Image: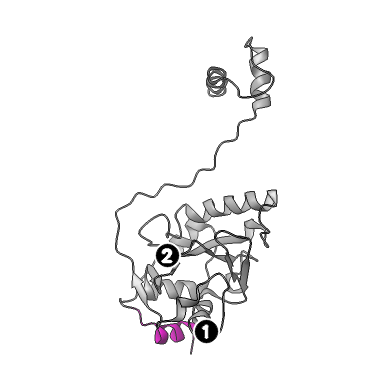
Amino acid sequence: MTDLDALVRLCPPPNQAMQINWDGIESTLGMPLPDDYKALADRYGPGGFCHYLTPYHPHGPTEYVNLTGPMPARIRSYLRTDYDRGTYPVPYDPDHLFACGVTGNGEYLFWITDPVTDSSRWRIAVNEARGPRWFTYDGTMTSFLVSVFIGETRVPQFPDSLLELPPTFTPSHPVLVKFRPYVAPVVIDTGAVRAWARENGYDVPARGRVPADILKAWEDAQNR
């Protein structure tokens, strides 16, 4: 019996299986996806387990749960900042963390995409929404779900009440939404702006905020 068979037995899907264009999805993401995840997403469709744990899905109805939406890149950017600054002890290089789910408390599920070309070897990591703890599961997303739902795996970040009732799956309702790609904020080198301003006859302070009119003039000059 496969992990998906075990999950279906624990938590029957409410809908017919989907037929997702995985070649197109993987082309969009630029990487192969685990076979277990593709079978899981096909069988269950978009939605959440136990009103708590929502795997990202290629047809997720909002940008916050869509696998090809902006959230994976946005979360990776946040992790990169934490990793570089030492804010939280991120245990893996953020370049090898791809967000693939979210919980009702704001934790994220990640694939540890190492090696990126062999998704059969990817593992699962879970962060803490407002704290430093991480949990790593040495297996696939589907086996992780099964192990959690039968009580074999205890994730410290998950509430004890998660297993008080039998596991359920609630499909997402379609939502009309226009996805916007994540755009990283532009960082302006104020030193370069000050040097340009002085060379062009502007009176610019040596410290503090660069006046808005000088910034505008500098931006106009860069776009010529």
Residue at x 46% of width, y 86% of height: 6
Place of residue 102 in the rendered image (x, y in percent of width and height, measured from the top left): 48, 64
At horizontal 65% and vertical 30% (from top left) the residue drawn is 189
**The quadrant where residue 113 appears:** bottom right
| Callout 1: SS | loop
Asked which quadrant contains residue 166, the reply is bottom left
Between disc 2 and disc 1, the foreground one is 1
Q: In this view, does 69 lie to the left or right of 201?
A: left
Residue 65 forms part of the magenta stretch = no
Q: Is the magenta stretch mostly helix, strand or loop?
A: helix
Q: In which quarter of the image is residue 210?
A: top right
Up-down relation of residue 193 to residue 203 (above or below): below
The x, y position of residue 202, in whole percent, is 62, 11
The numbered mark at residue 57 is: 2
Identity, as a three-letter code, of the amino acid under mark 2: His
Q: In this picture, which residue range is highlighted in magenta? A: 1-13
Residue nearest the viewer, comparing 25 with 191:
191
Query: Residue 219: x percent and y percent?
Result: 55, 23
The kind of secondary structure element at disc 2 is loop
Q: In this view, does 96 lie above or below 162?
A: above
Question: Which residue is denoted by mark 1 in the rendering?
Answer: 151
What residue do we see at 64% from left, 27% from top? 190
Question: In the image, residue 109 lies at what x, y percent?
Answer: 53, 66
Rounded to the nearest angstrom, the CA distance separating label 2 from label 1 is: 25 Å
The residue nearer to you, when weighing 36 against 9, is: 9
Q: Name the N-terminal-most of marks 2 and 1.
A: 2
Q: In this view, does 160 lie to the left or right of 171?
A: right
Assess whether residue 6 is covered by the magenta stretch: yes
Circle on res. 12: none
